[in-house]
Image (spheres, helix red, strand yellow):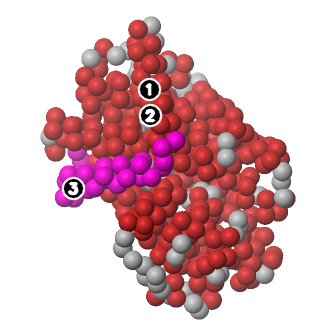
């Protein structure tokens, strides 16, 4: 019998990492927000909102890549913030990130579960409580599937990724075969004028499209389990974003080439209605089942990545020690998984999808995205460029672009959500100083 202390193992290849990223990105989001984005933009130029989401993802992925390749450890942003802000502020910033993760991660998990239950209405016409029963059950099933060794999870991820890709390709090929695939591109600028109203609409619509791209960085949270991380972490992110951007644009173009614009706006199950219009009711039902599989796959990947964050912080003595334990036989952070899953279960019963989507972005932009970019600036200044095995091109221009766009997205979430994000940070500050005073966390190395 082995007496080795349980530890995370580098078992995930580039294929595994890319699969996990992509199934996290393509959740229920692109299927449920397609109509919302079209409604907000109110014209065929709604495709620009999906392009804007891809642009932000690319420039932000450069920040993640430079940090992830240099600090390939479980917990991703926790280590990035701790190292970036150094001895004076690193402990506080990393604690605030983990604190918000304890709320924001369950919101992400709940959003996928709620989206799953809402889309299931295509078949079952569920009432409010039945929807909540479905969303809660989905969270429980995902936790059960993740309660196993990482190499098994890698294989499950590839299987789910194949299902995601197959679904997206069917949707896209249907539009191409229809023969009108290029029409939405030809008419993308019909009625378009570059003025304040368009810019404002693009901002609000981009809140929804950016939500659909989130997850390209999931590999960083699994940094301690990635093979050859200095190369595979950046590669997996850029492959994921490129692939998903092409798929999202092609899917939107396909739908717009078949359905009238007003139908796109009004439909609650727009992709299912699109396939139904092309191939009949049976095909519409089949694609709905596949979309539900995609939503489940995203929920699986997101929960996997987030479960590593409290564990990483607790192992570093920067968060509550309860989360520092790995399962003695399966070697994964089971306490982290169970706590985050339990909170997600409660959130899936309490909230609606629109509230969750806006809340996810508002809550994480200041600390994780903007704070992390500033942390990279500080780390480069302190360590020098030679510290980083992967360096973003044209540094630091992409970094500043990312900060500006994230600031605009934060503003576009609205006053209520901005205040809720600030409230979570304020509560985190209180929790930090209480934990520090009670010596529940070790901040000596960060002071």
- The residue at which mark 2 appears reads as 422
Q: Are marks 1 and 2 in contact (CB under 8 Å)?
A: yes
Q: Position of residue 331 (x, y in %)?
A: 55, 31
Residue 200 vs 247, above or below: the answer is above
Gap in Å between the C-alphas at discs 1 and 2?
6 Å
Instruction: For label 1, count other residues whose C-alpha is less than 10 Å away and answer few (under 14), some (14-19) or many (20+).
Output: few
- Image position of 171 (left or right of 130): left
Instruction: For label 2, count other residues whose C-alpha is less than 10 Å away and answer few (under 14), some (14-19) or many (20+).
Output: some
Element type at marker 2? helix
Q: Nearer the viewer, mark 3 or mark 1?
A: 1
- The residue at which mark 1 appears reads as 426
Residue 238 vs 304, above or below: the answer is below
Q: Residue furthest bottom?
A: 179
- Give the residues in magenta: 387-416
Assess whether residue 412 is covered by the magenta stretch.
yes
Q: Which is more N-terminal, label 3 or label 2?
A: 3
- The residue at which mark 3 appears reads as 397
């Amino acid at each position: 019998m082995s007496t080795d202390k349980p530890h995370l193992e580098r078992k995930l290849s580039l294929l595994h990492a890319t699969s996990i990223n992509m199934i996290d990105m393509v959740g229920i989001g692109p299927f449920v927000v397609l109509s919302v984005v079209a409604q907000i933009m109110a014209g065929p130029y709604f495709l620009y909102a999906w392009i804007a989401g891809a642009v932000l993802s690319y420039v932000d992925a450069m920040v993640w890549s430079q940090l992830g390749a240099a600090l390939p450890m479980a917990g991703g942003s926790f280590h990035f913030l701790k190292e970036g802000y150094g001895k004076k502020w690193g402990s506080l910033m990393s604690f605030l990130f983990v604190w918000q993760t304890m709320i924001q991660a369950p919101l992400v998990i709940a959003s996928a579960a709620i989206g799953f239950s809402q889309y299931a209405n295509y078949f079952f016409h569920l009432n409010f409580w039945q929807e909540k029963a479905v969303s809660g059950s989905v969270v429980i099933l995902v936790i059960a599937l993740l309660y196993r060794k990482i190499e098994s999870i890698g294989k499950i991820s590839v299987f789910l990724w194949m299902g995601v890709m197959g679904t997206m390709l069917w949707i896209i090929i249907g539009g191409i075969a229809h023969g009108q695939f290029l029409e939405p591109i030809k008419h993308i600028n019909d009625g378009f004028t570059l003025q304040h109203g368009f810019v404002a609409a693009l901002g609000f619509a981009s809140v929804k499209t950016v939500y659909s791209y989130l997850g390209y960085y999931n590999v960083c949270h699994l940094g301690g389990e990635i093979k050859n991380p200095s190369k595979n972490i950046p590669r997996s992110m850029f492959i994921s974003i490129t692939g998903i951007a092409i798929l999202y644009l092609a899917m939107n173009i396909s739908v717009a080439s078949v359905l009238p614009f007003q139908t796109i706006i009004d439909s609650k199950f727009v992709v299912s209605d699109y396939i139904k219009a092309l191939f009949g009711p049976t095909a519409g039902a089949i694609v709905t089942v596949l979309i539900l599989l995609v939503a489940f796959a995203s929920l699986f990947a997101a929960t996997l990545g987030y479960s590593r964050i409290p564990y990483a912080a607790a192992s570093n003595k920067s968060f509550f020690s309860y989360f520092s334990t790995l399962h003695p036989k399966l070697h994964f952070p089971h306490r982290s998984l169970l706590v985050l899953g339990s909170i997600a279960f409660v959130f899936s019963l309490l909230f609606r999808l629109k509230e969750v989507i806006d809340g996810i972005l508002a809550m994480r932009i200041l600390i994780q995205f903007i704070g992390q970019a500033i942390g990279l600036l500080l780390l480069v200044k302190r360590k020098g460029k030679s510290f980083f095995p992967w360096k973003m091109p044209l540094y630091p221009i992409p970094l500043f672009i990312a900060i500006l766009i994230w600031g605009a997205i934060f503003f576009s979430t609205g006053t209520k959500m901005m205040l809720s994000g600030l409230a979570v940070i304020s509560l985190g500050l209180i929790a930090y100083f209480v934990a520090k005073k009670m010596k529940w966390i070790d901040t000596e190395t960060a002071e």
